[in-house]
Amino acid sequence: MSGKGPRVAWIAGLIAGSVATGAFTAVPAHAVVGDAAKDGQYASTAKLDIGGKRSCTGTLVESQWVLTAASCFADDPAQGFRITAGAPKQRTTVTVGRTDLTATGGATVDAVELVPRGDRDLVMVKLAKPVTGIAPASLGTAAPRQGEDLRVAGFGRTKDEWAPTRLNTAAFGAGSVAATTVDLAAKAPSDAALCKGDMGGPVLREATGTTELVAVATASWQNGCWGTDGTQTRTGAVATRVDDLSDWVQQTYARTLLGRRGWGDAVHLASGYFTGEPTGKRRMDLFVAWKDGSASLFQGADYNDPKYPFTREIQLEGAGSYWKNAVAVTAGRYTDSGTDGLTVRWNNGKLSTYTHVDEKGFHEEKTLAEPGSWWSHARLITSGRFSANALRDDLIVLWEDGSTSMYTDTGANGVKKETQLTLKNDGFKNAVQINAGEFTGGKTADLMIRWNDGQTQVFPTGDTKGDHGRVQITPVGYHWTHAAQITVGNFTKPGGPLNDILVRWDTTDLSYYPGVEPGAIPSTRGPFGEVQLVG
């Protein structure tokens, strides 16, 4: 980049490091010589100050995690990228969301943990706290193609600045693509180069209005960079690929996802495939309405780790929103779109359905019952495929008088086709929670009821008339009397039966019980294999 900028006092302590002849990858690159980024561009790009002696660039990939080159933290980067996991040896500060480092936007946060990849020059850097208001970069999942146009961003040196205060970018073309690396050659400007300070900088694919992170810059000849002696004529750079590491990146930052929330404030839980259709890898998403009226969506993971079933939190509504008025919430399939929506009973008696929920919010609200209707007497609701031939989910309702009803094919019929399952005072006033799940191996959903004495039972195919093969999950007096919220979903086996049980306890703990195969629910002994998520 060509802009001028003042030197800062600590820059004198930066590592010198030049690329030795014939040793292209031995010395990492540290900065982009190209064009200054516009205000707000590439806001997920981060500047790392390591001990006041070394500068690197990185990318915010989750609100509390930055991805950069492991070499940044090596004692001698020229000797390799192997580093020890744990706290950084030197105090490291990370500035993100600030195209101009002299401005006041974004955030500056200490780094508290390093999680190196090991097999390549990459490390995940945990921040002391999440940053807000800055969208993390999306990881690409397709490998760079030879000849593909890519863009690199960095805070390193330029041709005429030792310590630029503005983010610079340049266009590069992808050259040879190896198993873990991709070669880069400057395109625009044609004499662009990576210099000191650009190590770990994002290599981005920009197409069809989207930007994806596909690699991080890790080595360069530094031709034309400030401080070189002018004898280096070779150009180009090397970047370390990340397009094949989405599972590792997600599993790393998922460790801190749920613990940032006070789960004692979760009022409603509902699980479903909101952010995409079920696949052989995806787990269910979790919708949460909080005590302060805010609403969140936790996206289901597409990697295989039962301890971390979700990969990110999507804020749908802020504090004080209309979700403070929700009395009962359930998720279900109400259209043929392949994704799930929500049915909500509000405190004014209104019953409404959102046919689809995703990261952009709530879509196509349909009013099933107007405010002031008899639905003000609905105490608990749950959606499931209880009708054998239903294309969409049915709705089971437990009323205040203890009676229960089922409304079939809610998506098409609304709440017009009622079938009464039990009469009032049939004992169902003792039900605390109801959920739908596939527990017994049938082609339709089963009804799970948690009673006020701690006992939890499953009624196959939603049959509440008599025992008819009801299965006991927890006995009377079981500690599930402390279960404040329960939802049933697929959190461990993508594409499998909906037989995991997630519990928000009356403390701040959150855990779930991975389901067993349908038809093999343990009787009277309680569920097995609790996985504690928070607490």
Image (spheres, grey):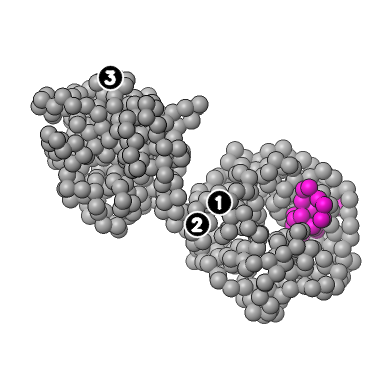
Observer-nearest of 146 and 47? 146
Tell me where residue 414 appears, x and y as whole percent.
83, 46
Q: From the viewer's perspective, is 403 left or right of 106?
A: right
Q: Residues within 10 Å of mark 2 (few under 14, many from 20)?
A: some
| Residue 156: quarter of image | top left
Whether residue 401 is visible, yes or no, is: no
* On screen, residue 488 above or below 137: below
Observer-nearest of 27 and 501? 27
Q: Residue at x 74, y 69 (%)?
A: 458
Between label 1 and label 3, give the one nearer the viewer.
1
| Residue 524: quarter of image | bottom right
Q: Which mark is residue 190?
A: 3
Q: Amino acid at mark 3?
A: Ser
Q: Residue at x 38, y 42 (%)?
A: 242
Q: Give the Cα distance between marks 2 and 1.
A: 8 Å
Q: Which mark is residue 281?
A: 1
Tell me where residue 209 appears, x and y as whole percent.
50, 27
- Asked whether disc 1 touches disc 3, contact meaning CB atoms under 8 Å apart, the reply is no
Which stretch appears magenta?
372-397
Q: Amino acid at mark 1?
A: Lys
Whether residue 385 is in magenta: the answer is: yes
Say which residue label 2 marks: 304
Q: Amino acid at mark 2?
A: Asn
The disc, 2 or 1, on the residue closer to the chain's N-terminal end is 1
Q: Residues within 10 Å of mark 1 (few under 14, many from 20)?
A: some
Tell me where residue 191 appears, x and y as whole percent.
24, 21
Tell me where residue 386 appears, x and y as whole percent.
79, 57
Q: Give the Cα distance between marks 1 and 3.
A: 42 Å
